[in-house]
Amino acid sequence: MTEITPAVPVTWPGGARCAVAFTFDVDAESPLLSTDPSLADRMGVMSHQAYGPLVGVPRLLDILDGLQVPATFFVPGYTAHRHPGAVRAVADGGHDIAHHGYLHESLVGVDERTERDYLERGLEALESLTGRRPSGYRAPMWEMNWRTPGLLHEYGFLYDSTLMDADHPYELAVGTDGRSLVELPVSWALDDWQQYCFVPGFSGTGLIETPAKAIELWEAELDAMRACGGLWILTNHPFLSGRPGRAAALRDFIARVREHDDVWIAGLDEIARHVRAQGLAPRSLTRPRPAAEDHA
Ligand SMILES: [Zn+2]
C-alpha cells in the first residue's frame, strides 16, 4: 500500500506568513430543494433561504467593497437562475465566482453521467450569466467522490476547495501521469452553518450562537494558522451571515484581519494561481480499502 504523505508548506507573496480567504456559499434555496423537493411548499422556509441573495449578498458586498477585500463566492447554478441580480452584483464587484453544483447535489453514490450533468448545468448557468467560466469548484456539503477530481480537471477547473486533510494548499494528483488540481483545504470549524443555521425539520437544533462566539472561534483558528503558515479559509452563507448583527461582527473581524501585516488576503482564484506557480509535486490520495474488501 502506498503511504499518503502530508502536504508541505508553501511560500506566500510579500513575505506573508499565512494566506486568508473569505468565501461565501450562495446556497439560497438549493440545498433544501435537492434534499427534499417538497420543502418548496414551505413558503416560510423558502423565504429564510431567499434572504441570502435578496438581502445578505448586497450587504456583504458593501462590506467587502468598503474594506477593499476580494472574496470568492460559490454559486449553485440554480441560484444563478433564480436570483440573477445578486450573482451579477457579485461579478460586478470583481469577486471570484466559482461552481457549487447545479442544485447543490450530493456527489456521493451518483453515477458518472449524473455527475457530468451537474457540472455542465452549473457551468452553463454561471457562464451564461457572468460571461466567464469559473476556475474554481467546491462540492456541495463538502462531499465528493473519488472520481470527482478527475472530472474537475477534465472540465478545466484550476482549483477545488472541498477536502480537509491539510493546513496547506497542495496539488492533488489526478490519475498517474502528472495531471493535478490545486486543492485549497477547508475545515468545519470555519463554517458559519454550524454556528447559526436553524431550519426547523431540516438543519440545526434551535440553538443559535452569538456572532461574538463564532468570531472568537474563527479568530483563534486564524491566530494559530498564522503561526503554522497555512491557508485559512472562512466559509459563510449569505442567508446566515448576511443578517445585520452577524454581518456587522464579520465586518469588524475582517477589518482586524486586514491590520495583520503577516497575512495575505485574496480570492481563491488568485491563491490557486499562486500555488500553481510554485510547481509543487502532486500528492496522491487513495480510497481506503475497508477490511471486508481486503478479505473479499
Ligand atoms: Zn453549499
Image: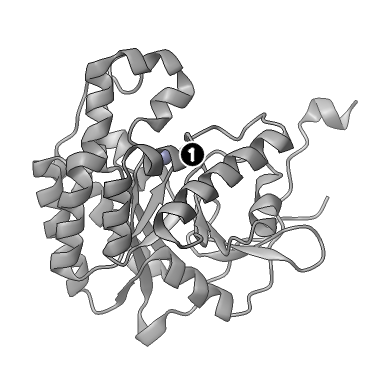
Residue 222 falls in which quadrant of the image? bottom left
Apparent side of residue 140 relative to residue 235 in the rendered image (left or right): right
**160 left or right of 285 in image:** left
Residue 202 position (above or below residue 208): above
For disc 1, the neighbor class at 10 Å (few under 14, some 14 to 19, many from 20) is: many
- Look at the picture and state if 290 lies above or below 138: above
| Ligand 1 lies under 8 Å from the Cβ of mark 1 | yes
Q: Give residue 176's quadrant in the image.
A: bottom right
Vertical order, 262 against 269 (above or below) = below
- At mark 1, the secondary structure is helix
The residue carrying mark 1 is 140
In this view, the residue in front, 101 or 17, is 101
Indicate the quadrant of ligand 1 in the picture.
top left
Give residue 129's position: percent from left, percent from top: 41, 53
User: Mark 1: which amino acid?
Assistant: Pro
Residue 184 horizontal side relative to residue 93, left or right = right
Q: Residue at x 15, y 50 (%)?
A: 59
Tell me how many marks there are: 1
Which residue is rendered at x = 21% and y = 24% of the image?
207
Q: Nearer the viewer, residue 30 or 120?
A: 120
Closer to us: 187 or 243: 243
Q: Is residue 253 visible in the rendered structure shown here?
A: no
- Residue 254 position, x and y percent, is 19, 62
The residue at the point 33 percent across, 13 percent down is: 41
- Whether residue 178 is visible, yes or no, is yes
Colour scheme employed for the rendering of this structure? one colour
